Image (tube, grey):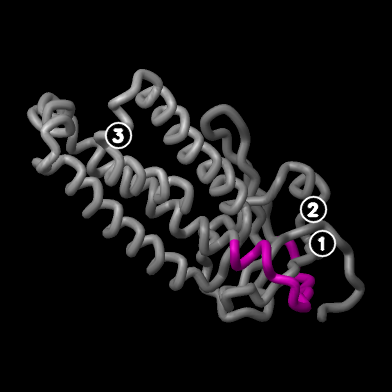
Amino acid sequence: MFSTLFCLVIVYHCRTWIYRFQAGAPLLALSFGGALFFPMAASLHVWEYHIIDNRIGLALALVAWATSTFFMWRLFQPSRDELWNKLMERVRANPSRWVAILLVPMIWAGYGFSAFAFIDTQFDWANSRIFFPTVVAKTEHLRGSGFHYYVTLAPWPRDYSGSAGPEGPEIPAGIYDRLEVGKRACVIQHPGFLGARWFGVDACHAPAQA
């Protein structure tokens, strides 16, 4: 997210300089592509975590969306720079510009939430709590190019109202295969570095509930 923001700032303030030499446009395309790809790959990894208190993350995503919408709108406005105006003349007359104005902020909103989730989970070294709820049901769905696996757990001590969805949290295939309906699962709840609790599900058999 921060690399993408940095790249946009460079584009906005150095737009004339970028196009004054032959390799400027290709280098800009490569840098902007990398700035989008690497945060996106990290975001997909972060979404595997199950965050309970996600209000702060949603607020940050809203701020990222509003800020990026403003900058994208400003990017298409007339400028004092004649070269930039000439380059953007055709784009301003094309109605498809609204696709970029609306789509890019949505990507940044996802980056905003992912940045919050990444810091909250990856820097959380505090002691965790372990619960042993019973596995109520297992569900798998074929979506896109592969299967997605979900597990429904019996209520376990938490003030958590189903933000993982009606079918329970999504889990990896390996854990899904080891879990058995009617037996206990191992839920590890972490306090979160930024105060947003998150949890993971694993297969384990405990004689008593913590």
Tell me which segment is drawn in magenta.
Answer: 119-135
Query: Which residue appears at 73% of the width and 60% of the height?
Result: 201
The amino acid pointed to by label 2 is: Leu
Disc 2 versus disc 3: distance between alpha carbons? 58 Å
Is residue 165 shown left or right of residue 91? right
The amino acid pointed to by label 3 is: Trp
Asked whether residue 95 is in view, the answer is no
Residue 183 has which mark? 1
Q: Which residue is mark 3?
A: 17
- Position of residue 111 relative to residue 136, above or below, is above
The residue tagged with tag 3: helix, strand or loop? helix
Q: Are marks 1 and 2 in contact (CB under 8 Å)?
A: yes
- Position of residue 185 relative to residue 131, above or below, is above
Q: Nearer the viewer, residue 40 or 206?
A: 40
- Position of residue 105 relative to residue 199, above or below, is above
The residue tagged with tag 2: helix, strand or loop? loop
Q: Nearer the viewer, residue 58 or 123?
A: 123
**Which circle's residue, 1 or 3, is located before the other in the chain?**
3
Disc 1 versus disc 2: distance between alpha carbons? 8 Å
Dot in front, 1 or 2: 2
- Residue 73 point in image, percent of width and height: 18, 47
